[in-house]
Amino acid sequence: MASVESIRREYERYPPTGIRKYTRWFRKRVPTGLYARSLLIIIVPMVLLQSVIAFVFMERHWQTVTQRLSTAVTRDIAGIVDILETYPQDEGYESIIRIARDRLDLNISIETGGTLPPPRPKPFFSILDEILSEEITKQVQLPFWIDTVGNSNLVEIRVQLDGKVLQIFARRSQAYASNTHIFLLWMVGTSLVMLLISILFLRGQIRPILRLADAAERFGKGQPTPEGFKPRGADEVRRAGLAFIRMRERIERQIEQRTAMLSGVSHDLRTILTRFRLQLALLGDDPEVKNLDQDVNDMQSMLEGYLAFAKGEAEEDVGEIDLNELLEKLKHDGQLLSRDVKINLSGVKKAEMRPNAFGRVINNLFSNACRYGKHIEVSIHCDDNWLVATFDDDGPGIPEEAREDVFRPFFRLDEARNQDEQGTGLGLSIARDIARGHGGDILLANSQLGGLKATLRLPV
């Protein structure tokens, strides 16, 4: 797998262009969770559809109805203007006022010698003011003044005639489709109700996927499956859940079989080696016998490593570990070995791990540091939901090209570390196997003390 640095260098060398550039920009700004993305799949089309419907409705229906209503009102006003200018009226204009009120539903008054008020600023986005002004200009063709602003139910129109001003009050509903908001309220309200129902159903579909992901993550960390876990949800999610359960059972059976096999083989070989040791003891102190006895001791040490490996593979329940107590024990063990040990614990005091397996990893890394170094620094802290334990020593270290090889079973370096006669080459293999069984890993690097730095990372 390519490292983060190599991926960054590759990105800088070959930056995305064209459609890939915008696609990557878009992916970085959308939610990454399945639940959030599913909501977007529901919400975005609904909002776009409502926007299109609202635009078409405003453009076609609302504007057309307002146009026709304003045309009708303006036609009535033009008729009143023609009557006033064509036929003689009584002194108080009572007849034309009555006809306008009773037949045309318009309240009018004539102000003799009056003039129009100064023009008012045009309101922003007022479809009534725009359409009504256009119709009066086209049909009446006289100077006019109009007031459509405000929450009043009336629209005031003034027309300049010869020596007088015609003032008209018309109901806003006569010239304007005033019930449009009801359609919008119904559309938005219905959409919100449907969206709420969709969210409730969607949560029910997402929950089994989240439970499956949690079960897989816990299994990857070596923790037991959540209590009561079983496949739920849609058929595809159920199939994935069943596949996970069967996979987990196969892995557990394989681990049990390998553990049983290693334990059985190691036990049988220990019996044979015990007989070898007794027979060699009866042969005396011959130099060749001493060489054979050393070979038997080496085989005995290897078998102990096998048994430790098998023990590490055995099932163990997760428990709470007191990290402060564990570090104090390491410091005490280091003092018994005449080592200068410094410990540092920050951000976390307890951890949920397999106690024996976790203790085996910590003791293995610490014993390696004590074996090859005189000054050891041990630090444990939490970093973004990860438990990080570092072991620094001032020993000879390990060459960079061999840092992955030392994790292979029975691998031994020709120089520097791992030259003790008692080593079997299984210690780091067992430690990394346990760490990866918890969902973590062990990494090796140069230490600031001049030796090796071993870093253990485990999810918490």
Image: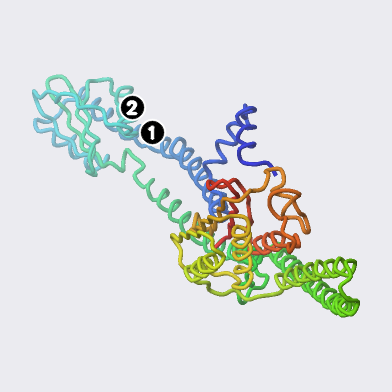
Q: Secondary structure at mark 2?
A: helix
Q: Amino acid at mark 2?
A: Glu
Query: Residue drawn at (23%, 36%), measured in percent from left and top?
Result: 149
Task: Work out which quarter of the rendered image holds the N terminus and state it.
Answer: top right
Residue 190 at x, y percent in the picture: 47, 56
Task: Work out which quarter of the rendered image holds the C terminus and state it.
Answer: bottom right
Q: CA distance from mark 2 to mark 1?
A: 8 Å
In the rendered view, does 141 fall on the left or right side of 386?
left
Q: Earlier in the sequence, mark 2 or mark 1?
A: 1
What residue sits right under mark 2 in the picture? Answer: 135
Q: Secondary structure at mark 1?
A: helix
Residue 31 at x, y percent in the picture: 53, 48
- Viewer-proximal residue among 23 and 191: 23
Q: Amino acid at mark 1?
A: Gln
What residue sits right under mark 1 in the picture? Answer: 67
Task: State which quadrant residue 299 falls in.
Answer: bottom right
Label 2 with label 1: CB-CB less than 8 Å = yes
- Viewer-proximal residue among 233 and 73: 233
